[in-house]
Amino acid sequence: MEADNDDLHFKSEPLGSKHNRAAFSCGDDHLDAYLKTQANQERKKKLCAVFVLTPDGKTIAGFYTLSQYSVEIGQIPEDIAHKLTRYNEVPATLIGRLARSIDYRGKRVGEKLLLDALRRCLDISREVGSWAVIVDARDETSAAFYREFGFVDFPNIAKRLFLTTETIEDMFA
């Protein structure tokens, strides 16, 4: 997927050996360490898929991870849950991590990463059922970022939010 920003053109692609993980810094030591030391291992073990946004095929402007997930029906707001199913859990997709390099602040890379992830989740949901995309925001600032895109808070789980696949379909219609 191509996304442009002013004179920058970004490409979204799976994390690979050509990407310079060592140079990436988002300002959060845990996320930096994850990309540098764990992301490739988790990708190889099929625990998650890791995607990067890059302007040149090497530099990492940002990254996100996706994995399959399930949500207990009791966690979903009651007005939605009673319309879904009688099963105890519903399938979902988890954006486990999402981070933008400090070198790309003010370039809307966080937004581009999220939209790329949502588009990918929508595409995946056409092959493997997924009721919603789930995120666990690190803090209130992150939660507010997701809410700007229509994510809704789970009633009893702090900073866990969801966006239904139906809503994502409408976003890209």
Image (cartoon, helix red, strand yellow):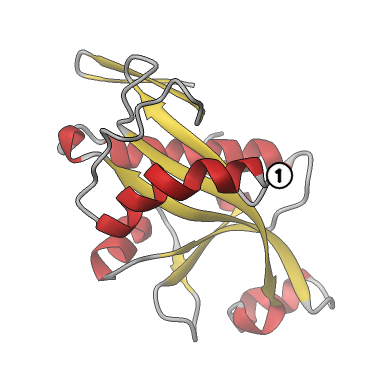
Is residue 67 shown above or below 14? below
SS of the residue under disc 1: helix
User: Would residue 52 appear left or right of 138 to someone viewing this image?
Assistant: right
Can you give x and y, in whole percent of width and height, for residue 42 in the image? 58, 48
Direction from residue 113 to residue 50 in the image, left or right: right
Vertical order, 156 against 38 (above or below): below
Q: In which quadrant is the C terminus drawn?
A: top right
Q: Residue at x 78, y 46 (%)?
A: 128
The residue at the point 29 percent across, 42 percent down is 100
**Spot occupied by residue 39 in the image (x, y as percentages of width and height):** 49, 45
10 Å neighbourhood of mark 1: few (<14), some, or many (≥20)?
A: some
Residue drawn at 58 percent across, 36 percent down: 120
Q: Quadrant of residue 68 in the image?
A: bottom right
The answer to whether one can see residue 80 in this image is yes
Q: Single out the residue that lies furthest toward the right.
A: 86
Q: Position of residue 146 (x, y in %)?
A: 37, 57
Which quadrant holds residue 88?
A: bottom right
Count the marks: how many? Answer: 1
Name the residue nearer the viewer: 19 or 99. Answer: 19
Q: Which residue is mark 1?
A: 125
Q: Is residue 148 visible?
A: no
The residue nearer to you, when weighing 66 against 89, is: 66
Q: Residue at x 20, y 13 (%)?
A: 7
Q: Is residue 25 left or right of residue 52?
A: left
Q: Is residue 19 left or right of residue 131?
A: left
Closer-to-camera residue (162/62)? 62
Mark 1 is on which residue type? Ser
Measuring from the top left, give residue 108's x and y in whole percent. 25, 36
